[in-house]
Image (cartoon, grey):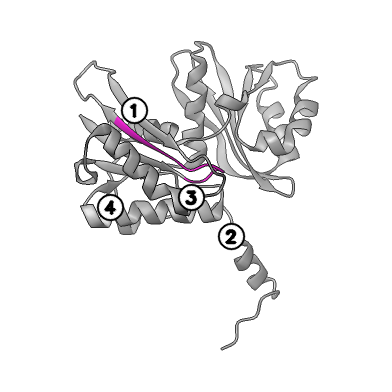
Amino acid sequence: MKKILAIETTAKYASVALLLKEEKIGSNDEVVFFKKSNKEMNHLVDLMEIIDFVLKKAEIEISDVDMVAPSIGPGSFTGIRIGVSTARALSQACGIGCIPVRTLKAMAELDRNREVDFMHYACTIINARRNQTYAALWLFDESGNISETFKQGQYMIDDLLDEISRINEESKYPVYFYGDGIDAYFDKIEKAMKNKTFDYEIAPLNQRYQSALEVAREAYQQIEMGKKPVDYDELLPDYMRKTEAEMKLEEGKIKINS
């Protein structure tokens, strides 16, 4: 039985999932213990309490966990730091390997809730403010296999929507949108997509946002594909852009007294 402790702190609500996956050949059996904070941006206060909750529900100790898998970003800079730092501490203290999970890739797992068996795209989109997004476009085939259509990165919302339309000009596959970028740019998405010759759909609120459940399943997929865990000191955040303080320092808006 593989035991993966997943941590998601890139969104407004912190969450933790403990995935217990049967490793027998041909078995799809899994058990998931899941808990989400009920307060926005309360990661620092809630995270260890939530971790303790899922471990107690599963009746195991942290030392019984095989791997810890944090969502490393992009997303809330503060949230990313809290999640990655917590995972590093658990890894170092308990000798647990780490599986870093990129947030936009984990979010693509939300699309599997639809259980569709036809070619389609999933756009995972996080609000980066000022008409900017962190986003990626994923192509799902009839068997549920996934490939990255364009690179996970930082895009202006208009450029992102134009690129989706360009890529889909011939294939006309349906496009499904996920993430809090929908909340920020709903009107822009609707305006850009409504006159296209392909279908699109915006995920409902209960299927829209990233959680530790998707992180756990993406981590397991990586393990299945042969990815080896890393040591705690190799576990690094992926902010996908410089922090506001770093940008201000480069622009000369912040001075450091020597």
Q: Residue at x 23, y 15 (%)?
A: 26
Q: Nearer the viewer, residue 123 or 72?
A: 72
Q: Position of residue 232 (x, y in %)?
A: 30, 55
Q: Residues within 10 Å of mark 1 (few under 14, many from 20)?
A: some
Quarter of the view holding residue 186:
top right
The amino acid at mark 3 is His
Please tell me the numbered disc located at residue 59: none
Q: Is residue 143 left or right of residue 97?
A: right
Q: Would you name the residue on which mark 3 appears?
A: 43
**Residue 238 makes an appearance in the image:** no
Image-based side of 182 in relation to 86, left or right: right
Label located before the other in sequence (4 or 3): 3
Q: CA distance from mark 1 to mark 4?
A: 21 Å
Mark 1 highlights which residue?
32
Residue 129, visible in the rendered structure? yes
Q: What separation in Å lies between label 4 and label 2 (alpha carbons)?
A: 26 Å
